[in-house]
Image (cartoon, rainbow, N blue to C red):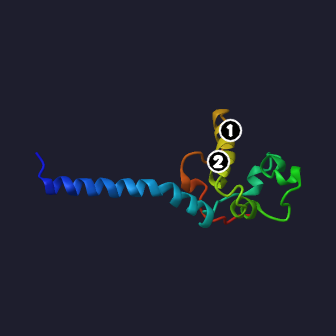
Amino acid sequence: MWSPAKMILIMIAVSIVAALFLMLPEKREASLREAPLLDVYFVHKDHHQVGCAQCHHNYVDGTGRQFGCYQCHKEDESVNLLVEEQFHGLCRECHRELKVAGEKSGPVRQCGGCHKPDTKP
């Protein structure tokens, strides 16, 4: 049986953990809004078989042509909470589809496969 002092310590610890857990969504949202995106290694020439409009919706709908992906998706409050989900969904899903079809594909699981400084055009 636990002593009253030990029970109080356990209750305090549980309360702290619960408070931190409740703060996570707020911290995650702040991170998505404020933190820079991780560098992504992306070589356009490796994607020449993919039509530009498949990734660059702004070629089709005429929005943000003067900006790159980052400026719109990260700085626009209407989409910046979705930026990670949108980019991961677009890139990873395309890579997965190629892999399942038995074709050469980009990385699908390892973060470091994409998130490293871009050193090629």
10 Å crowding of disc 2: few (<14), some (14-19), many (20+): some
The one nearer the camera, 109 or 20, is: 20
Say which residue appears at 63% left-offset and 53% top-offset.
84
Q: Position of residue 31 (x, y in %)?
A: 56, 62
Counting residues from the start of the chain, the first of labels 1 and 2 encountered is: 1
| Furthest-top residue in this view | 101
Looking at the rendered structure, the number of numbered marks drawn on it comes to 2
Quarter of the image for the C terminus: give it. bottom right
Which of the labelled discs sits on residue 30, or is there none?
none
Task: Please report contact status of discs 1 and 2: CB closer than 8 Å, yes or no.
Answer: yes
The one nearer the camera, 93 or 26, is: 26
The one nearer the camera, 78 or 50, is: 78
Q: Which image quadrant for residue 112? A: bottom right
The CA distance from mark 1 to mark 2 is 8 Å
Which of the labelled discs sits on residue 106, or is there none?
2
Quarter of the image for the N terminus: give it. top left
Say which residue appears at 83% left-offset and 60% top-offset.
64
SS type, badge 1: helix
Inspect the image, locate mark 2, and give the three-letter code of the amino acid beneath it. Gly
